[in-house]
């Protein structure tokens, strides 16, 4: 009896464990194996790692990926928080607004990138409108090797538009879970609107904020479709370089190093979030 | 100190009228208790006074100032919520002290006050805990502590002792009453516990279905209930109610039913014939006394509380509940003679349920 009972939880875990082993641990080990073996020949080597680390494109890709994350995530969280607070006032017809805000959730990154291209390309909406209004004589080039700055911002806008709804949904759910009575107590005890936000809303929203941040940071390091379609390799990024090495150059072992770096960063981020930002024991 | 005036205050939620045209003047420093059964609108009325709920009709004045449309934070009130509303992310001491911090009181003063309140409520050991580490009764005491450190002009308490054990409740009752007397803060206290109401309130307002039934001191509420509801709601065991007719015999009015005839004092305005006679269990005696009416019946149940004995007696006109002080040796099935004190009877019109005696 006793041993059966103590086995039960592990048996219940088995499918998950098997899944993780087959689809996560094995590929990771395989990738690690590729990282430390040469493209041709046998034995172990650090040559792949050395090759990547000494390639300036890698550092640029790393820099761009971090830069994009650093710009996009705060923007998304800020926007999503504002939207969630606004919607949570539950004005008439607020559900309609929720549906409108969450439409982009249904789009893949490729469709989002294509829509964005249609807006910003030389023959896109923006240029058409500006040309028709005679505000400009020639189309503005948002894309191209000489326009990496505007490319960068178009990517930021597209990503913010595409992925903010996810953060918004998590934060809205979090807001709606906070009991009304906590705000009523704050009202009675003389909190101003701002004090309620700082001392009640934010702390009680912390778990949701953390989930949203963790998800978004992980996804940000895997950013690929939008950048690849809008900027190609004008703005190299980690995932893009992995793809490029793998399919264009067929440097599978180099690609493995890139892939492994993304995995390592993801694991590191999760660890940092879970360890340092864990919502103490307070909620 | 503030005088709170409610003028025809009404609160409707859609079709439900939770508070129905309530007018009360609560004097400066008065301790008033709102008493009534579950769902009668006590919490809603309190929330209207706090400003958390907007009144549908009527006005609320603090002294001469109209606060009807002021938000809660501008009313200088504090409140113990029925569901405590203790902030889950703050330790007990911060929960109690936070309202003071918001008011920018010096840290030293906050500490002193938190200490004082937590000692009074017996929660000094809990100051460093989070609310989820507390029992319901402990959380409730934190809520009370948070409300009293504020020194508000009006203190609103919604069943602040409902979750405490009997012993602690009795102790807290006197503590809160003493505190209120020393702070002289106008207090509105909600409860559905009539003992709490009787012992704490300067005046008691009895509510039913959102309507004010009666307001007055415990003596008045107990001895001169204005209607059948108040008479039945106050007092334990409940007042006995007997359907009677009023007749005139030899020039005096008597109430009568099978096996019972009680003469009425003169000058009672009688219009109809159907009435309900009310007599409290302690106004029925087992020894004969002057100006009393003898009835007989069979004991069918005995509650021996030792401090009192409660007899349930079957008579010709229905069941009578009788409360006798002290121990009384009675056997179920025995016949017994009872004496109703004629001077203590109440009479209610059957239709309007209003008291006429
Ligand atoms: N927000 C609301 N929406 C709709 N109806 C409400 C709302 N709040 C209260 N009511 C209704 O108003 C009436 C009075 O409720 P209230 O909470 O004031 O009762 P109460 O006297 O405090 O009862 P209890 O002793 O159970 O706490 C009830 O019928 C209740 O269902
Ligand atoms: Mg209530």
Image (spheres, rainbow, N blue to C red):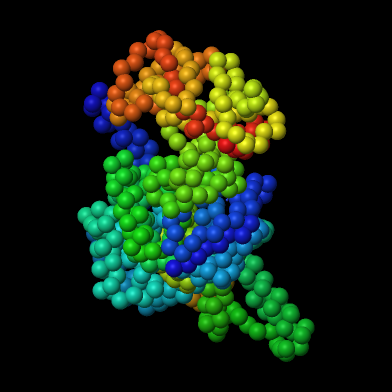
Screen quadrant of the C terminus of chain A = bottom left
Q: Quadrant of residue A134?
A: bottom right
Q: Position of residue B132 (x, y in %)?
A: 33, 51
Residue A142, by quadrant, is: bottom right
* Residue furthest to the front: B250
Q: Is residue B143 above or below residue A249?
A: above
Q: Is residue B336 above or below residue A208?
A: above
Q: Splitting the image into 4 quarters, where does residue B253 fall? A: top right
Q: Position of residue B205 (x, y in %)?
A: 51, 49
Q: In the image, residue A66 lies at what x, y percent?
A: 41, 73
Identify the residue at image location x=60%, y=25%: B254
Which residue is rendered at x = 36% and y = 64% of the image?
A: B183
- Asked if one can make out residue A144 in the rendered structure from this viewpoint, the answer is yes
Q: Nearer the viewer, residue A194 or B24?
A: B24
**Residue A194, horizontal then vertical, whole percent:** 47, 72
Query: Quick check: can you spot residue A21?
Result: no
Quarter occupied by the N terminus of chain A = top left
| Number of residue marks | 0
User: Would residue B340 appear left or right of A91 to someone viewing this image?
Assistant: left
Residue at x-position 58% and y-position 30%:
B264
Residue ID at (58%, 48%): B212
Judge by depth and name the residue closer to the eye, B88 or A184: A184
Residue in the foreground of this view, choosing between B171 and A150: B171
Depth check, front residue: A159 or B24: B24
Is A147 above or below relative to A90?
below
């Amino acid at each position: 009896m006793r041993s059966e009972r103590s086995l039960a939880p592990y048996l219940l875990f088995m499918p998950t464990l098997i899944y993780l082993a087959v689809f996560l641990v094995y590929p990771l080990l395989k990738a690690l194996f590729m990282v430390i073996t040469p493209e041709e020949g046998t034995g172990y080597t650090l040559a792949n790692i050395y090759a990547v680390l000494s390639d300036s494109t890698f550092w640029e890709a790393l820099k761009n990926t971090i830069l994009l994350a650093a710009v996009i995530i705060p923007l998304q969280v800020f926007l999503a928080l504002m939207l969630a607070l606004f919607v949570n006032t539950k004005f008439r017809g607020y559900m309609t607004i929720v549906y409108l805000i969450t439409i982009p959730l249904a789009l893949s990154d490729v469709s989002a990138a294509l829509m964005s291209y249609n807006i910003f390309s030389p023959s896109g909406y923006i240029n058409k409108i500006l040309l028709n209004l005679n505000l400009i004589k020639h189309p503005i080039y948002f894309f191209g090797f000489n326009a990496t700055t505007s490319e960068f911002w178009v990517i930021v806008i597209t990503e913010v538009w595409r992925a903010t709804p996810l953060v918004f949904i998590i934060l809205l759910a979090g807001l709606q879970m906070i009991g009304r009575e906590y705000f009523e107590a704050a009202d009675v005890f003389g909190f101003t609107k701002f004090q309620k936000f700082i001392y009640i809303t934010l702390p009680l929203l912390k778990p949701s904020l953390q989930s949203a941040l963790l998800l978004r940071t992980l996804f940000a390091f895997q950013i690929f479709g939008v950048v690849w379609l809008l900027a190609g390799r004008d703005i190299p990024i980690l995932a893009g370089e992995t793809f490029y090495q793998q399919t264009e150059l067929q440097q599978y072992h180099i690609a493995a190093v890139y892939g492994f770096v993304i995995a390592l960063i993801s694991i590191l981020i999760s660890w940092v979030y879970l360890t340092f930002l864990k919502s103490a024991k307070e909620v | 100190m503030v005088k709170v005036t409610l003028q025809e205050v009404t609160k409707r939620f859609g079709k439900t009228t939770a508070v129905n045209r309530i007018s009360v003047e609560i004097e400066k420093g008065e301790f008033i208790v709102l008493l009534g059964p579950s769902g009668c609108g006590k919490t809603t009325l309190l929330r209207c006074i706090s400003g958390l709920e907007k009144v549908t009709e009527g006005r609320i004045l603090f002294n001469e100032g109209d606060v009807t449309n002021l938000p809660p934070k501008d009313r200088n009130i504090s409140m113990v919520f029925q569901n405590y509303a203790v902030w889950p992310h703050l330790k007990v001491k911060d929960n109690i002290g936070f309202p003071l911090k918001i008011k920018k009181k010096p840290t030293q003063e906050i500490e002193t006050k938190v200490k004082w309140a937590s000692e009074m409520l017996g929660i000094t050991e809990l100051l460093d805990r989070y609310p989820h580490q507390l029992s319901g009764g402990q959380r409730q005491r934190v809520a009370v502590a948070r409300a009293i450190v504020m020194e508000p002009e009006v203190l609103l308490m919604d069943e602040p002792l409902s979750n405490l054990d009997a012993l602690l409740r009795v102790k807290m009752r006197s503590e809160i009453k003493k505190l209120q007397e020393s702070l002289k803060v106008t207090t509105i206290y909600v409860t559905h516990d009539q003992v709490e109401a009787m012992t704490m309130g300067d005046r008691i307002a009895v509510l039913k279905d959102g309507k004010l039934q009666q307001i007055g001191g415990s003596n008045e509420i107990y001895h001169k209930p204005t209607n059948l509801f108040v008479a039945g709601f106050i007092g334990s065991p409940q007042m006995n109610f007997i359907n009677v007719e009023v007749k005139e015999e030899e020039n005096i009015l008597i109430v009568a039913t099978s096996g019972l005839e009680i003469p009425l004092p003169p000058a009672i305005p009688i219009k109809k014939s159907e009435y309900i006679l009310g007599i409290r269990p302690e106004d029925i005696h087992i020894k004969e006394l002057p100006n009393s009416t003898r009835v007989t019946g069979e004991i069918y149940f005995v509650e021996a509380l030792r401090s009192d004995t409660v007899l349930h007696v079957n008579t010709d006109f229905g069941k009578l509940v009788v409360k006798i002080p002290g121990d009384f040796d009675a056997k179920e099935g025995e016949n017994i003679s009872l004496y109703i004190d004629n001077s203590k009877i109440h009479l209610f019109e059957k239709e309007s349920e209003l008291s006429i005696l």
